[in-house]
Amino acid sequence: MKINLLPPKMRRMAGRANRLRYAVVIGLVIVLMPVYFTYRLGVTVERLAQNELTLKNRVGLLTPFDALLTERAELEKRVAELKQAGGERIHFVPTIHLDELLRLLPPSTFLSSIALDKGSLRFNGVVGSLTEAATLLKLIQTSPLYDSPLLSQLSSEPRGYRFEISATLLGGERK
């Protein structure tokens, strides 16, 4: 329970004083809050302007490196493409074809050269007789690793018969 011992005229003024204090405080808050936020906004804008200037200076220093960074990105992209292509590619194993060729050669055959790539085999040399040349051609034809052998040269020499054979490769690949 509240007891107000002030005379009635002063009691009314005490209530007004309280209201006046509240009104002054609220008025100050209403006036000072925008001023405070405006000040903070100005400080933030100034800081952002300084940061922007600093970043522009740094960008100016990094501009010579743009060409290098672009080239590096292109090289990284190319390396990734090559790695992807290499992972999917079938690897050519030439030793399978060479082993097969050496297994098929008659004993008196001498090779002068061998050319082997992913699609074909070409070799030449000297055999002891026409029969050995025919036998060699037949053996290459029956091999599962060669297709369409072709005897493109056969000429007589003092040591025997010079030949040149080419064939298409089959098999000899692995993932």
Image: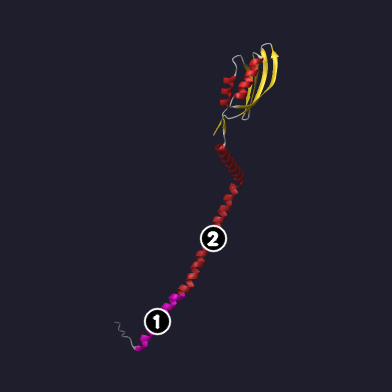
Residue drawn at x 59%, y 20% as measured from the top left? 104
Q: How is the image coloured?
A: secondary structure
> Residue 126, image x and y in percent?
65, 16
In the rendered image, residue 93, in percent from the top left (x then y), is placed at 56, 29
Callout 2: 10 Å neighbours few (<14), some, many (20+)?
Answer: few
Crowding near the residue tagged with mark 1, few <14, some 14–19, many ≥20 C-alpha atoms within 10 Å: few
Q: Position of residue 11 (x, y in %)?
A: 36, 86
In the rendered view, tell whether residue 9 sits above or below residue 24: below
Q: Which residues are magenta?
A: 8-27
Q: How far separated are the C-alphas under marks 1 and 2?
A: 43 Å
Chief secondary structure of the magenta portion: helix
Query: Disc 2 marks which amino acid?
Result: Glu
Residue 17, which numbered label? 1
Q: Which residue is mark 2?
A: 46
Quadrant of the image occupied by residue 64: top right
Disc ID at residue 100 = none
- Check disc 2 and report its element: helix, strand or loop: helix
Image quadrant containing the N terminus: bottom left
Q: Residue 15 magenta-drawn? A: yes
Q: Residue at x 52, y 61 (%)?
A: 44
Note whether 33 is above or below 107 in the view shown. below
Going by the picture, which residue comes out furthest to the bottom? Answer: 8
In the image shown, does 86 or 118 lie closer to the viewer?
118
- Total of numbered circles in the picture? 2
Residue 61 included in the magenta stretch of the image: no
* Vertical relation: 43 (above or below) 146: below
- Residue drawn 43% across and 75% down? 25
Secondary structure type for disc 1: helix
